[in-house]
Image (tube, rainbow, N blue to C red):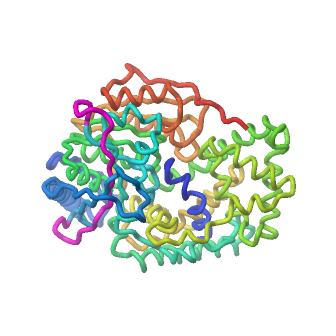
Amino acid sequence: MYGEDYLRDTEAKRRTAAAGSAGALIAATLIAGAVTAPTASASQGDSRHRTVSEAHGAAIAAARAAKAGINWQDCPPDWGLEQPIKCGWVTVPLDYAKPYGKQIKLAVDRIGHTGTPEERQGALLYNPGGPGGSGLRFPRRVVTGAPVWAKTAKAYDFVGFDPRGVGKSAPISCVDPQEFVKAPKMDPVPDSEADKRAQRKLAREYADGCAERSGEMLPHMTTPNTARDLDVIRAALGEKKLNFLGVSYGTYLGAVYGTLFPTHVRRMVVDSVVNPSREKIWYQANLDQDVAFEGRWKDWQDWVAANDATYHLGTTRDAVQAKWLELRAAAKKSPLGGVVGPAELISFFQSAPYFDSTWASSARVLSAWAAGDTQAVVDAAAPDPSDTAGNASSENGNAVYTAVECADAQWPTSWKKWDRDNTRLHRDHPFMTWSNAWMNLPCATWPAKQRTPVNVKTHKGLPPVLIVQADRDAATPYEGAVELHARFKGSRLITEKNAGSHGVTGLVNSCVNDRVDAYLLTGALDSSDVTCAAHATPKP
């Protein structure tokens, strides 16, 4: 579910390594401006008590942060954030039910608005996706002068943060980063029951490693807790209400925040939406991804075939698929460069279904291999052996992804169900199905408490939310945007038609860009939902 910034940097390595590797609904309660939501526990009474306690703890933590503020300083050199970006820390409880218990520090950064004092409208907080993505690069959009965000930057300070467990913010780990990047990994598509048993063993070992290395954090690595953290950051910034931009998983974080803290929202843009239905979080959502990835993979193949004069891979989708299967078989028989097998190939080529900005580079690699250049594949798809820098590694990102999705919801524990569902899907959607299954299988034997997802819905005081979605998105299928639109009354949905890039608001499409600017700058929304034509098709 990763979003635009994080995915472009680390998604391939994360999935490569990972491939080897109901409680009762409780009536919402308004406490200190926060609407509480249920969590799973042994009994309804225990759940109600924790719900109220966490809401009360969040209010205490926010009040404490508002008083303390943030001591902004030059960013540490090794953070890679140039001036005039400033960095600081916000302290939050590990467990909101115990607000005076153990505290953790969250890394935040900020760049001031570029307009006049009169133009300033506050801070715009950002989450790029994941779970496991760092938002600390967000202020760099101002430093680099990204034109899509120039108007918004005049009115808002751009604020990024590392969510709990991520990067600089009490980072968690599940395996030695050196082990995480070793390649090649086992082919995610099983040839036998023995292959499945081996993958199941890896998943159990990964879950056990999370408990061994990060056990204290695991019960508290939930989206509701990250939403509470977001509210504490809002308070520490001195903002009465939150302005928020969330992409991919960041949309689910926004949806949960809007449910828990409806009166604290000022403006909220959610882009490429996770389906917030309790029935989807998170097992079914991942199965839905597999179907959508196959569709977008075919879109890429159609584009490659249409540009056969450049890539020479065939003039039909089937011909391009045949070349992909040839490459996959060759890597399975003998890993390319000793390190690129089928798992590593999937990790690299999955960027094509994620972003059409990678269509040309993905096609170039496959074309080079077909012409006899094996090194081009190795250079593109081999894991980075230096990607072991502790809290900055893809191992950390994968650990957070797993910890949050496993803790947010009850997962099936029956292997027969996993096997049946993924075997069925793989028949018609083979590109990602088994890879995705093994990545999530640690949740079947997760060693920490699993909650019941928040019942995302409109509560009194929630202002209109702007939803942006491409209708052929692979990572977050379009139905998720429709579902959130129905749950958040008064929201508006902008659909980019016949498009599938994950993360729409960062692309150049004036139909989308102008409406996002208008909403963030003035609160203006169209009187009804809007359909925009797709952004420009990539050129070969």
Whether the magenta-drawn stretch holds residue 106 is answered as yes
Q: In front here: 148 or 103?
A: 148
Residue 215 on image: x %, y %: 37, 76
Horizontal relation, residue 159 to residue 429: left or right: left
Looking at the image, how many numbered discs can be counted on the residues?
A: 0
Magenta residues, start to end: 98-121
Q: Is residue 323 above or below residue 490?
A: below
Which residue: 45% across, 56% down?
133
Q: In front here: 479 or 398?
A: 398
Q: Is residue 90 above or below residue 362?
A: below
Residue 454 on image: x %, y %: 33, 51
Horizontal relation, residue 411 to residue 430: left or right: left
Query: In the current view of this chain or complex, which residue is farthest to the top?
Result: 527
Whether the magenta-drawn stretch holds residue 113 is answered as yes
Horizontal relation, residue 503 to residue 326: left or right: left
The answer to whether residue 279 is visible is no
Image quadrant holding the C terminus, namely top right
Q: Residue 187: name its quadrant.
A: bottom right
Which residue: 84% across, 37% down?
309
Residue 202 on image: x %, y %: 58, 75
Horizontal relation, residue 394 to residue 94: left or right: right
Query: In the current view of this chain or complex, which residue is farthest to the front?
Result: 83
Query: In the current view of this chain or complex, which residue is farthest to the bottom?
Result: 212
Q: In front here: 219 or 368?
A: 368
The answer to whether residue 31 is visible is yes
Which residue: 31% across, 58% down?
74
Q: Residue 39: name its quadrant.
A: bottom left
Residue 196 on image: x %, y %: 66, 71
